[in-house]
Amino acid sequence: MSLVELIAQADARGLAASGLACIDRCLPLLGGDDELLRPLWASLADGSDWGGSLEKARAALGSAVPVGDVGDDAARLARRMLDAAPAERTADAVRPWADACSAASLRIHRLLDPAADATTDPDAAPAEDTADLSPLVAAELRRQTAVLELLAGHGVNGLRGALEVSVEGRRVLRAVVSRRARGATGPGA
């Protein structure tokens, strides 16, 4: 099933987990602690309100986002995902947010992928065939699909797996961001 179909069929918890997972994987762009979003994951598991934890996460990251290069554009997109998270986790509230997070996260990965073709439009819709995508974007598309499949197939019990998928993606993006930073401050910079 395609990512678009999975989002269309997901329930409120699956949609919230999908959007949260996108933010979680992009956390290195915001300078956030790896544990920053754990209370939000916990609220998905126990069904509690996540509004307070959402506000704490936003406050912990502040509102400053750097301005300048492609990495800064990616950081702004990541911040917008967090800022746009709805306080209520109803399907009607989280569906457009989860869809926007999916698109933003794919765009972030296109912007940061060193193997991406410079002529590729970062705003283009994701291809269904990952063979047509750069490696970082293809991996992000697979992670987004995996998160939604885990929640669709296992409900609340799929949250642990979804979090593991997000942690793996966060590590990958952190390595990409680190390489970009070294390249910017390396010889000749």
Image (cartoon, rainbow, N blue to C red):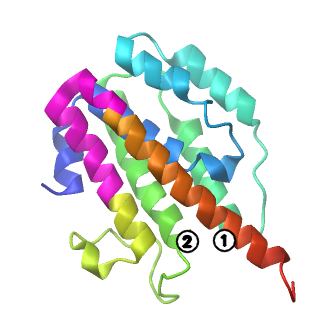
Q: Main secondary structure of the magenta part?
A: helix
Q: Which residue is mark 1?
A: 70
Q: Judge by depth and name the residue closer to the eye, 149 or 58.
A: 149
> Can see residue 152?
yes
Quarter in which the C terminus is drawn: bottom right
Q: Which residue is under mark 2?
A: 111
From the viewer's side, name the closer residue of 122 and 158.
Answer: 158
Question: Between disc 1 and disc 2, whose residue precedes?
Answer: 1
Decide if residue 188 is on the left or right side of residue 99: right
Identify whether 44 is placed above or below 99: above
Q: Amino acid at mark 1?
A: Val
Residue at point 59%, 37% (across, down): 83
Task: Give the magenta-colored segment's residue range.
Answer: 142-160
Q: Nearer the viewer, residue 161 or 78?
A: 161
> Could you tell me which quadrant the N terminus lies in?
bottom left
| Label 1 – label 2 distance at C-alpha | 6 Å
